[in-house]
Amino acid sequence: MSDDSITIILKDKTYPMHAGIPLHKALRILDLTANAHLALRDGQLITEDEMLKNGDRIQLIAVISGG
Amino acid sequence: MRCRKCGQKAVINMRQHRLALCAEHYLEWLPQQTERFIKKYEMFTRYERLLLAVSGGKDSLALWDVLWHLGYNVDGLYINLGISGSLDYSEQSQQFAQNFANERDLKLISVNVHEKYGESIPEIAQRTRRGQDKACSICGLVKRHIFNQTARDGNYDAVITAHNLDDEAAVLLANSLDWSLERLGRGQPLLPAGGGFVRKAKPFCRFYERETAAYALLRAIAYISEECPFSIGSKQLFFKQDLNRWEDHMPGTKLRFYLNYLSALEEGAFPQRQESPAELEQQRCPICGQPTITGTTCAFCRLFEK
Ligand code: SF4
Ligand SMILES: [Zn+2]
Ligand SMILES: [Zn+2]
């Protein structure tokens, strides 16, 4: 099995990611600011220290609005 | 990470407060804090009639929900700007605002700019010099005018906006980079009534944007998540993005930036407006009756001068 076993979804884009790293690290890899996003797993909000496990689908929500 | 109050799994970690909370305790904490800020800055009371600017976005609907739960007497004002874009932004956001009000049996006043003034915001922007490539400048002016007018006509005691700390910090950063002392003098969470302006309060001013979003999500509030097409590439978004990068590396940066500014403001670090309310009272726009600094036709009415 490949280690790209996590899917991160932001708006209509999906990003593959390896399992076994915490959410904040995944965000850093994707160059996304933690403070500008919330993350849901199975519809539940999770904190940035949460470990991403094989098969997880993480939905990100951009929280910053402008204007 | 565990909730500080009950030890259950936390849903949010606010590093600037060193505070992680579960859903249940977060939904308790945010309204309690809102109440604390309302009291601290002496914004308004439960005996007063309040008018909240509602955009259909997460902040204004979350704030309406909080104030409603806290037992405040709040009506909403939605201003349909006539902004379409591919998603029909104005129509959609109005629908979210209206649904929210209907579900809770709250009063929402809706003003349609096109119906009332014959032109939408993009049309006014295109026609006027002030609006060239800057729909937001027109939009802000029109919204402020309608908000104040509606509050005065309806005899509201105070108007409320759902600005969060990220909004305030982005404006603060922009004004600091410009050394705009006059604007820096006007960043209080509460602006008292005076000279024809209704008292203005921002009860969410100490929450980070992701905290108001988390509240809306946990409460399952349906809000418009699409952005106004004119906000794309805006300076405000750019500043917010940078502030959040700093925040990621140095938790508490945004909070300190804002709170230390408020302290400086209170200590008189920035010039306050010189006109007394009585003086301002005499400087009314001859067309709409709202106060103006110049004493002649106000900037809003000038938009429609032939
Ligand atoms: S982004 Fe600009 S045009 Fe759009 S609602 Fe905000 S101020 Fe108005
Ligand atoms: Zn708890
Ligand atoms: Zn006028």
Image (cartoon, helix red, strand yellow):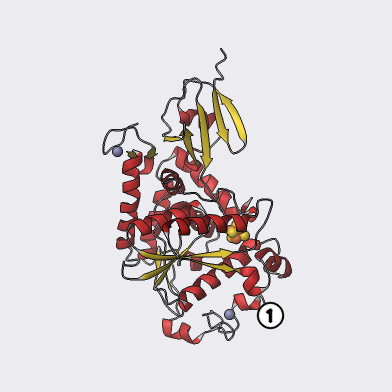
Label 1 lies in ligand 3 vicinity (Cβ under 8 Å): no
Q: Nearer the viewer, residue B245 or B178?
A: B245
Q: Relative to residue A29, is residue B147 depicted above or below?
A: below
Q: Quadrant of residue B164?
A: bottom left
Residue B95 % position (x, y): 56, 56
Residue furthest left as drawn: B6
Q: Which residue is mark 1?
A: B305
Q: Nearer the viewer, residue A42 or B136?
A: A42
Residue B289 % position (x, y): 53, 83
Q: Quadrant of ligand 2?
A: top left
Left or right position of B175 against B12: right
Left or right position of A67 against B134: left
Which image quarter holds the N terminus of chain B? top left
Residue B168 % position (x, y): 47, 56
Q: Is residue B163 visible?
A: no
Question: Does dot 1 land on a helix, a strand or a loop?
Answer: loop
Q: Disc 1 residue type? A: Glu
- Return the chain for callout 1: B
Residue B138 % position (x, y): 63, 67
Left or right position of B265 against B126: left
Q: How many marks?
A: 1
Q: Residue at x 51, y 75 (%)?
A: B149
Which image quarter holds the C terminus of chain B? bottom right
Q: Relative to residue B125, is residue B2 depicted above or below?
A: above
Q: Residue at x 45, y 76 (%)?
A: B154
Mark 1 crowdedness (10 Å alpha carbons): few <14, some 14-19, many ≥20: few
Q: Is residue B207 visible?
A: yes
